[in-house]
Image: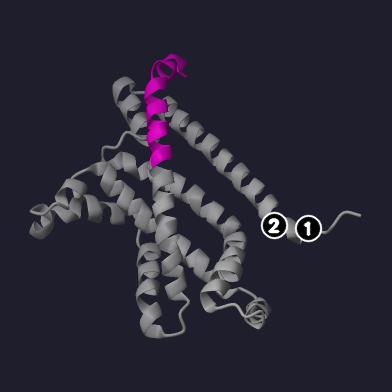
Amino acid sequence: MDIQVIIDNLPLYFKGLWTTIILVASSLGIGLCLAIPIALLATAKKKWISFLPKAYIYFFRGTPLLVQMYMIYHGMGQFEIIHDSFLWTIFKEAYACALIAFALNTAGYTGEILRGTIEQTLFGEIEAAKACGMSVPMIYRRIILPSTFRRALPAYGNEVIFMLHGSALAGVITIVDLFGAAKIVNSRSFVPFESFITAGLFYLCLTFLIVWGFKRAEHHFHAYLRPREN
């Protein structure tokens, strides 16, 4: 192994690491903001209300992320109404297209996670809230949503990790993230093993930090489930 090549290109890897962190964090933040109303609408009893959010979830969970990103990055430019409008300033940028694709994709997966946990809320908790005189918005704000977020933590932790790994696709559309940095190093020095194993180690470290963070969050928010110590 040629370690010196990796050492010489560490600044490029750290630049790609920062790009990956910002892209993933931004996508997850936007996606979560979209997922909450999607999940709430998907749990509506009236089918004409729940149809569209369920269709959204089905589409983004049923198609590959790479296809979605290509549709946005390569596909939007073929529509004159977009090409000739202010929207083209967004869709012509690779970073903006990747951010939109990742945010929409994680919104679909997160929306399904939240939909499932909302529907699993114990009926007795809701009845108790109604007995206390809470309105429907207050029940959602104080009972359903807090309980949903606590129970969704393990599944959402997996989604964050999947989103981190999926972000490697950003390197396919010229963004210099971790994967993009590895491609550049490989093209310069022709050392594919060293180039990509280094990127893999960075991803491994980020995954470890995410797992550790969610474990700590679960330990904190699930404290009421642990038996009391005498």
Q: Position of residue 26 (x, y in %)?
A: 39, 46
Q: Which residue is mark 1?
A: 226
Q: Secondary structure at mark 1?
A: loop
Which residue is located at x 37 percent, y 78 percent? Answer: 51
Give above or below for 218 relative to 140.
above
Toward the front, the furthest residue is: 133
57 horizontally vs 78: left or right:
right
Instruction: Say whether residue 11 is magenta.
Output: yes
The amino acid type, in three-letter code, at marker 1 is Arg
Quadrant of the image occupied by residue 14 = top left
Which residue is located at x 30 percent, y 56 percent? Answer: 68
| Residue nearest the viewer, comparing 82 with 70 | 82
Q: Visible in this render: residue 38?
A: yes
Q: Which residue is mark 2?
A: 222
| Residue nearest the viewer, comparing 64 with 156 | 156
The amino acid type, in three-letter code, at marker 2 is His
| Residue nearest the viewer, comparing 160 with 89 | 89
Q: Please report the bounds of the magenta region as a residue range.
A: 1-22
Mark 1 packing: few (<14 Cα in 10 Å), some, or many (20+)? few
